[in-house]
Image (cartoon, grey):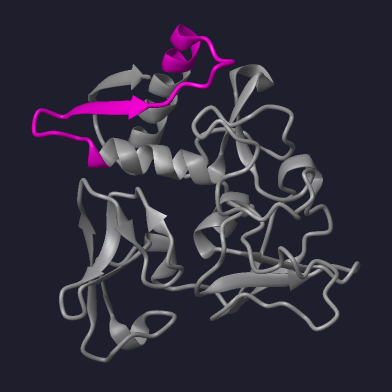
Amino acid sequence: MAAVVTGPDAKPAANRRCRFELKKYKAAFKCEVCRVKSYDTGRYRCDHCGKDRHIDCIRLADEIELGPGPNNIFSTSPVFTLFDNPRRGRNSENKKWAKNCLVCGMPIRHYSYHAQTTENKDLNMHPCCAELATFNTNSRVPLELQTGERHSCVWCGKKRPEEASKYGPTDFYCWSYRLTEGKNRIHVHCYTEMVIEALEQLDDDDNIHIVLKRRRSSDRNDLESILREFINIGLNVAGIGFTDIFLDLV
């Protein structure tokens, strides 16, 4: 992993005066390439343009091959190609949700990977989300990925995040992390939101204080225990050391 990447050597290329240096901060950021807000403490930052990139977005591959994914949805090992905007064909069978990320469910606003299925469906995903489903699974995947909406998300309390399309199929679109032996789950998007909020609430004494609205159907102690455990997992993935977490469920 290069400590410094110049603008022309980045992919997508940046201004020739850009100089991206690998840095670490205890703060969330928005990646210039995929436009996704991230909790990664390590990122490439250019002081000339003042922009940040995910470590994986500093030199994106033209094509990637994904692993089987949850429920083997990529069993045919499709090849995804990089574009500067999400692709949707004129005869696409999923026009209503094609421009949303297959993994997190959120609208795609810049660079993304695309593949078209034999059923003429356009699949697009953020580069950082595609990383979760590659063959080289790494520490960015803190828990088992799954599809399906049997349970509501422990963070947002809904079947799908706010900006996710309601049209994507439940067995294919808008993934989540499996919690407590399948009895609970948290959306991939909400997991990121949760860790970002934890980072934003991190004080000078490394304490985190989060106020969260509790679902009526949830047990207070169980929910608090689940969230505290998985905030800790997320902070470890983000590169943050030990912290004290205080949750207020209202």
Instruction: Please tell me which residue lies in front, 89 or 44.
Output: 89
The image shows residue 135 at horizontal and vertical percentages of 64, 52
- Let me know if residue 221 is in the magenta part: yes
What residue is at 43 percent from the left and 61 percent from the top? 36
Q: With respect to residue 51, does 223 lie above or below?
A: above
Classify residue 194 by image quadrant: top left
- 187 sits to left or right of 183: left
Q: What stretch is highlighted in magenta?
A: 200-225
Q: Position of residue 17 (x, y in %)?
A: 21, 89
Q: Position of residue 43 (x, y in %)?
A: 30, 59
Position of 143 relative to 115 (above/below):
above
Q: In this view, does 154 lie to the left or right of 38?
A: right
Tally of marks: 0
**Quarter containing the C terminus:** top left
In this view, which residue lies farthest toward the bottom?
16
Residue at the far left in the pictured view: 204
Q: For the point 24% across and 42% down, which residue is it? A: 200
Is residue 220 visible in the rendered image? The answer is yes
Q: Is residue 21 magenta?
A: no
Front residue of 148/57: it is 148
In the rendered image, residue 180, in percent from the top left (x then y), is placed at: 59, 18
Between 190 and 161, the one nearer to me in the picture: 161
Q: Can residue 237 be seen in this view?
A: no
Residue 184: quadrant of the picture? top right
